[in-house]
Amino acid sequence: MNPIKVIFIRIYQKIIYFFTLFLKIREPEVLVGPEAVSQIPELLTSKKKKKVLIVTDQTISNIGLIDPLITVLVMKHFPFALFNEVEINPRITTIEKGLEVYLEERCDCIIAIGGGSVMDCAKVIGARSANPKQNVRSMQGLLKLKHRLPLFIAIPTTAGTGSEATLAAVVTDEEHQEKYSINDPKLVPNIALLDYTLLTKLPNNLVASTGMDALTHAVEAYIGKANTVKTKKYARSAVKLIFENIKQAAVTGDNLTHRSNMQIAAYQAGVAFTRAYVGSVHALAHGLGAIYNVPHGYANAIILPIVLKKYGKSVYKSLAQLADIVHCPAFNSKKEKAEWFISEIEKLNSDMGINNRFKDIIKEVDIPKLASHAYKEAVPLYPTPKILSKKELEELYQEIRNY
């Protein structure tokens, strides 16, 4: 990339970084444990709420993960409506359907129970209800929301996205075949309820892919150029917890300790990237979700080591620091530590059965369009350790396809 262009991009990122240091980004109030759900009706009543919209998906509904919530609402006679049509990569049309239910049922607060797709969809339903003159596309980017969301409670049923802690929501624009992010502190949930028992019914392959999503958040936050002392602390803790727990969590679903630790790690990684941002891994993965409906965690798992190799020496120091946290062998150089850390990510994927199937998914003809969308998302906003050109992003898609 042209060195002068790189300088201007870095200046832009420095200005954004300086501005965000003064931006108030709240952390949600955290309720922990299976007994926490019983507090919800009284909590809503204390905040003078009248009716809640529960946002989830068909799978969560069918396997009964929402039953404890519905039971306690019924017992306490607190009115609710249910919207359970969220898909893997939530589309604008789905958000608008959810908004119709919210308005028709005269709800004044939202509970999202599910994975990242559910929480993202629910966030944007809330954003649309509070900002009726703004369509979803106009919310794309940074700080576009004019008004606060209604009271929002996030209950994650996966340990990966960290959406219960973040200011981001990712949506799929089916008309333009794009997947993009809405970023605004108003999207941070008011309350995050972390109930580790909700993770026991999660299939092992989903534990693995969502866990690698959390690892991607933590790593991209840590190696980027918009860190603070706090984001580094959260990212390091998340990486350590994930390396210590993810394989066991993906194999022994009845071991609540490992899945509970993964839930904490996902939350910490979410807090970290809320202020420190993500990077090229996410920009590349979002296109695959938009065009081929690839699950986000799976895409991140495959792409993460490939992008880290592409960054080269720009990430040796930071990856070496993360390698030390997860007890790498003694090496003589940062480069060796960084390469070991990347190889361990690949080993995690292999051990958990996350295999690259992109040869059968990515079409050669789509690569220029994918790279263009990834570039538009990442540049100039994402403070990546190395700024990648459109050509380099095309090369990466080829590597991902042929890895």
Image (cartoon, grey):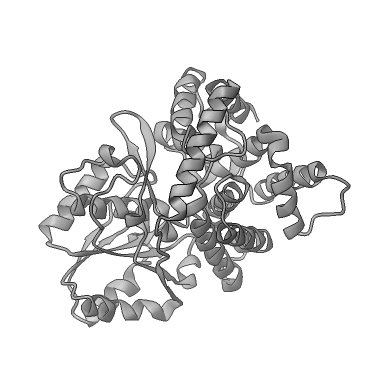
Q: Nearer the viewer, residue 37 or 271?
A: 271
The residue at 48%/53% (across/down) is 275
Q: Is residue 398 left or right of residue 140?
A: right
Res. 315 visible in picture: yes
In the image, residue 397 sits, relative to residue 215, either above or below, namely above
User: Residue 81: horizontal and vertical position, in percent?
Assistant: 19, 64
Q: Residue furthest top?
A: 365
User: Residue 102: horizontal and vertical position, in percent?
Assistant: 17, 57
Q: Nearer the viewer, residue 14 or 310?
A: 14
In the image, residue 315 sits, relative to residue 249, either above or below, namely above
Quadrant in the rendering for residue 153: bottom left
The N terminus is located in which quarter?
Answer: top right
The C terminus is located in which quarter?
Answer: top right
In the image, residue 23 sits, relative to residue 31, either above or below, namely above
User: How many labels were placed on the picture?
Assistant: 0
User: Residue 325: horizontal and vertical position, in percent?
Assistant: 73, 59
User: Residue 212: horizontal and vertical position, in percent?
Assistant: 58, 51
Res. 394 visible in picture: no
In the image, residue 24 sits, relative to residue 226, either above or below, namely below
The residue at 61%/62% (across/down) is 233
Q: Is residue 211 left or right of residue 191?
A: right
The residue at 43%/28% (across/down) is 373
